[in-house]
Amino acid sequence: MSQNKKQFGVWMDSHHATIVGKQAGGEDFVVLAHAKNSGAGSNSNENAANNLEKTLQQKFFKEITAHMQNIDEIHVTGTGKEQEQFVRHLADTPQYKNAVATQTTSNKMSDEKLVEYISQKFS
């Protein structure tokens, strides 16, 4: 039964993510949280900047997954490569590696449109 599955949706770019899911006992998708990645800023040392960027990205991904426990299915959408890296992060993380992840590319949308979009992906 699909209504018992833990399904989530995430819209993300490199600086912002909106997490959509069902609240405990709820049947409709709602916005659960927003996450931000402030980015590395300017750093004269390219190697240090790359390392900081990776660290901040991991922190960003952890902030997103903190809102999604026991994922069965997730649909990740966004503007670029960030969602591919996030899906790879899920696959490399033991507690999320069995989640069914799908992804699409989309422009930023309002919270309401995102809830509608994710609802359609799982209907």
Image (tube, rainbow, N blue to C red):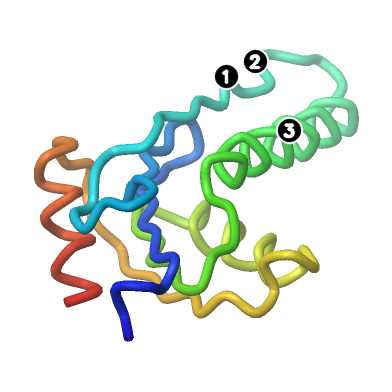
Alpha-carbon span between mark 2 and mark 3 = 9 Å
Residue type pointed to by label 1: Ser
The C terminus lies in quadrant = bottom left
x%, y% of residue 35? 48, 29
Residue type pointed to by label 3: Glu
CB atoms of marks 2 and 1 within 8 Å: yes
116 or 36: which is nearer to us?
A: 116
Residue type pointed to by label 2: Gly
Q: Earlier in the sequence, mark 2 or mark 3?
A: 2
Mark 1, residue position: 38
> Splitting the image into 4 quarters, where does residue 28 fall?
bottom left
Horizontally, residue 69 falls left or right of residue 26, namely right
Mark 2, residue position: 41
Foreground mark, 2 or 1? 1
Q: Which residue of the protein is positioned furthest toward the front in this rendering?
A: 25
Horizontally, residue 97 falls left or right of residue 22, namely right
Q: Earlier in the sequence, mark 3 or mark 1?
A: 1
Mark 3, residue position: 53
x%, y% of residue 27? 21, 58
Q: Residue at x 80, y 68 (%)?
A: 94
16 or 114: which is nearer to us?
A: 114
Q: Residue at x 24, y 43 (%)?
A: 30
Look at the numbered disc 1 and give the secondary structure of its residue: loop
Horizontally, residue 105 falls left or right of residue 92, namely left
Look at the numbered disc 3 and give the secondary structure of its residue: helix
> With respect to residue 13, does 116 lie above or below?
below
> Splitting the image into 4 quarters, where does residue 73 fall?
bottom left
